[in-house]
Image: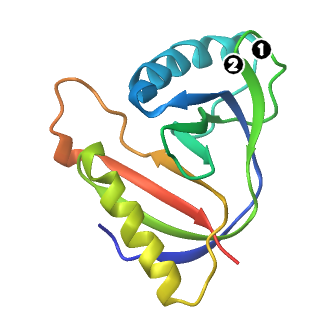
Amino acid sequence: MSTPELITTTATPTAVVREVVAMSELAPFYDRAFSVLPTTVAGQGVAITGPAFGHYFGMPGETVDLAAGFPTDRPVTPEGDVVAGELPAGRVARLVHAGSFDGLGEAWQALGAWIAEQGLTPGGEFWEVYVTEPSPDMDPADLRTELNWPVA
């Protein structure tokens, strides 16, 4: 893991599929979302401007309110499951996790502990940016996931 840092983000338009998903159904949800998003976005002449992300609206339990998507150069028009979204502007604690997705829970805990050590209050939503696109034949150690947690 990298050392956490505080950054300031600007609001970023996104194209997403958003649902309340059972934790056991995360992988199929992401697969479905990322299979429809590129075609829908391209069909509207909207450009994808960065890597895929998962935006969580509240702490996961048995289910999670989740948007999977891509940053875009402008909002999309709702079509099928694809809707316009936004990654928020503001102060964000950021950490880059190196390795398998299996280690993300521990990385989020480390970021939460760092936020508390700084005397900051974590926000109710947070997002992961999948900097390295996963593929079936890659070494999971090569994955990089950027964790972003707004703070006050």
Image quadrant where residue 85 sits: top right
Q: Name the quarter where the C terminus is drawn.
A: bottom right
- The residue nearer to you, when weighing 95 against 126, is 126
- The residue nearer to you, when weighing 23 against 44, is 23
Residues under numbered marks 2 and 1 in contact, where contact means CB atoms less than 8 Å apart: yes
Q: Mark 2 belongs to which amino acid?
A: Val
Q: Which mark is residue 137?
A: none
Residue at 55 percent across and 20 percent down: it is 33
Image quadrant where residue 13 sits: top right
Q: Name the quarter where the N terminus is drawn.
A: bottom left
Image quadrant where residue 139 sits: top left
Q: List the residue tagged with mark 2.
A: 41
- The residue nearer to you, when weighing 40 against 101, is 101
Q: Is residue 16 above or below residue 86?
A: above
- The residue nearer to you, when weighing 64 against 52, is 64
Direction from residue 112 to residue 80 in the image, left or right: right
Colour treatment of the image:
rainbow
Q: Is residue 138 above or below residue 79?
A: below
Q: Is residue 34 above or below residue 112?
A: above
Secondary structure, mark 1, is: loop
Q: Is residue 121 above or below residue 31?
A: below
Q: Separation of disc 2 and disc 1 at Cα?
A: 5 Å
Direction from residue 128 to residue 126 in the image, left or right: right
Q: List the residue tagged with mark 1.
A: 44
